[in-house]
Image: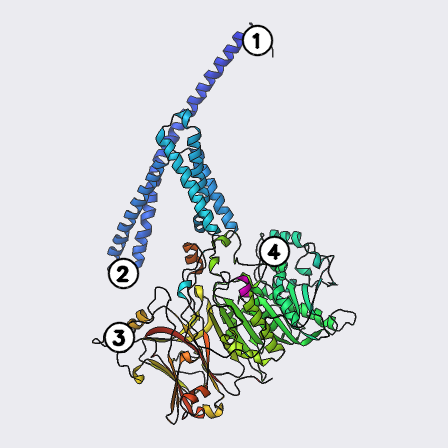
Amino acid sequence: MSEPSEASAPDSGVAASLWRSLGCRLAGFFGWCARPCTRFCGLAWRGAALGLIAAALFFPAYAGLCMGTGLGTAVDVAGLLLLGTVVLALSALILLLALALTRRVPLRFKALVLVAFGSLILIAKGFGFAPGFALRLGGWLVVLPMLAGAGLGILRHWRAQRAGIVSAILALLMLAVAVTGGAVVILWLASPGVDPYLREIHAAAEGQVPDLDAPDPSQAGPYEVATLFYGSGTDRRRPEYGRDVDLVTEPVDASGLLGSLKGFKAWARRKYWGFESQSFPLNARVWLPRGDGPFPLVLIVHGNHKMEEFSEPGYAYLGELLASRGFLVASIDENFLNFSWSGDLGGENNVRGWLLLKHLQLWRTWNNQPENPFHDKVDLSRIALIGHSRGGEAIVHAAAFNRLLYYPDDARVSFDFGFAIKTLIAIAPIDGQYEPVGLPTPIENVNYLVLHGSHDSDVDFFAGARTYRRVKFTDHNYWMKTALYIHRANHGQFNTVWGRYDAGPPLKHLLARGALLRPEDQQKIAQVYIAAFLDATLRGKSEYIPLFRNYRRAARWLPQTVYFNRFADSRLRVVSDFDESIDVTRTTVDGGFQTGANLGFWRHRRLEGRGGWSFQDHAAVLGWNTTGWTNLAPDEAPNYTITLPDALPARWRLDWQTILSFCLADTCDTCEAQAEEHPTVPLDPNAPPAADPNAPAPGPGRPPIDLTIELAASDGAVACLPLRHIHPLQPILKVTFTKWPYWERVRFKSATEPVLQTYEFPLSDFMAANPAFDPGRLKQIRFRFDRTRTAVILLDDVGLTPGPASLPN
């Protein structure tokens, strides 16, 4: 660029002077214009502030006007106005103090703090977390790096700025806090965690019972096993259902049950899988016994898991075992219905069940095709469905749809199934996520087994107990239902893909995994029960039925832990299930009568699991507290008596082979508080204080609960047996799911939930206790609470099972 000439220099100076003059005049003009605006805004702010104060005081004044305490409207309004004024003043003071403290903080830093915490909240919202939960969970990820950065920033410029030794010490402290805090958090997240209640829990069952006279069902059978795959042949993610598939299947249209997905979720799933609900594939991996057949058919279906982590291979430990024992097993692929980073489908359990029936249609077709490898291999008169998690609910819908002609929620969709589904097995199922026309799905005339773990932090309540309750037997065939609740079992270890974590990241790191059973032990329990149940229900091997009546009969096969089991069969006749009436004296069977005496607590209650989950069942709640009582006569002991109708023993043909059954559950640590609120018999003031056997012990925990079962005949003969004749009642289990108390409190809410245990007393045992007792004259069933000082228990499903104690082949 050339230098300006001398001639042009004066012109340039004049121009600059003119520009400066113009700028000053414009600034003056705008200042003159702004003066009234500033004056106006100043006046407006003051008025607006008074309006805000009035609004803030209006709300407590109006609340006082609406309260109606009975002290008078003026007192109510004045009282709440005073309270509102104090709260308003304190709030303003705290806010002004915060603003004063942050006045010298640079604006850019404030903005970055807001951005960091805002980013945390937004990301957490994508995971479905509330802002408060997100700040508690991830706030340290903002605070610790901020402290570390502050310390490094001070040290980096310490010499140049001559900040002094105090600044250096503060910087080092910031770094130490950040590093130590980060290390502690990382180690805490990586640790397996513990359940502090474990040391208090011991199995209550005492004494020896005869071992089951049958081979261990978890041992491999005589058949070699072949593995095959059938599927669409076009799967873009798994070659076993794509180019390497053994049998190609046609897709099915599920849009009538699921509808067509729309928006981003539909786009993301279509991009991943390459299909939509109009063309769902029928994919499965099959374990086939090498033999002539035909073999009972067993379908296994997984539940909801990350769809990109394929779930159906996780049941190979079951498929290979069952195939070796002569069952044809298929693990069904329904991963395309599972959740993903793009979201959960929700409300799809009807489709999960319907797809099982579409698979059964395939098997029916293949069984009749001479060129098919499954020709004449399938015994379609003996079918079982096994489902895990949402799959455990899906099998119930499949069994219901199997008997219908039309889809309940849209009768334009017709059904044509009619398969001989004999057995349902649910592993840690959910219930009620789908209800046809808003009603619980009925379950009739099918054998049912449910397994559930106490440390299941996915389905953290015993949802299968509600399904168990709905199973009804209405025809003349023999059916049975049974439930097993397993202490220290979780949700995921029933599937080898899901494993020890019942939640995905980041919550998986908060779970207390140290309390869990070993994966092989949990799977061993599943193998024993599932194989035995299939042998009993599809093959008629009645020698396994005692296992479901009393788990201790298989103690030599099962890992050591605490178990609860329930059992009922189609021969059971209910005396009282406490569901029929608001009259607490009325029995289920007509003409009976039930009443309590000397009880500290007696009422009927709806049963609920953890978090208020309804079991859709009711039970009698019975509590007593005899602490301090002395010289207690049998007729003075707290008791609960059920009186039978006069004609019942003859009508039900009660004899020495009849079994008395009932369910009990502990409800709480101690009954003292409840019993003191409902005293019926005064304590003896002169009696020396008695030790409470139910008081928490420092090591072993609470002892089990015992009581007396007393049967009275119409001729006056009485026979008694203690509950421990079978085994005493296990105290309620306490469970800790997580390492973080806050999440434990807001997510799981309670450390306990009631779990019922079935007791079966053969009437022949009462005859052995008193030979004069005649079961054909049974008049009263009495529960006498004379062996444990204080407790509150649940009593449910009191009944009698006539006929032989074991099912004939």
Q: Distance between the residues labelled 1 and 4?
A: 75 Å
The answer to whether residue 479 is seen in the rendering is no
Location of the C terminus by quadrant is bottom right
Instruction: Tell me the residue at 44%/90% (across/down).
Output: 775
The local crowd at label 4, few if under 14, some if 14 to 19, many if 20 or more residues have their Cα within 10 Å, is: few
Nearest-to-viewer mark from 3 and 2: 3
User: Where does the image place residue 156, in percent across and percent down from the top left?
Assistant: 44, 30
Residue closer to the observer: 622 or 223: 223
The local crowd at label 2, few if under 14, some if 14 to 19, many if 20 or more residues have their Cα within 10 Å, is: few
Q: Residue under label 3, please give it.
A: 628
Nearest-to-viewer mark from 3 and 4: 3
- Magenta stretch: give its range: 517-522
Q: Are marks 1 and 3 in contact (CB under 8 Å)?
A: no
Residue 4 bears which disc, if any? 1
SS assignment at label 4: loop
SS assignment at label 2: loop
Q: Residue under label 2, please give it.
A: 69
Marks 3 and 4, the one that precedes in the sequence: 4
Amino acid on which the number 4 mark rests in the picture: Glu
Amino acid on which the number 1 mark rests in the picture: Pro
Marks 2 and 4, the one that precedes in the sequence: 2
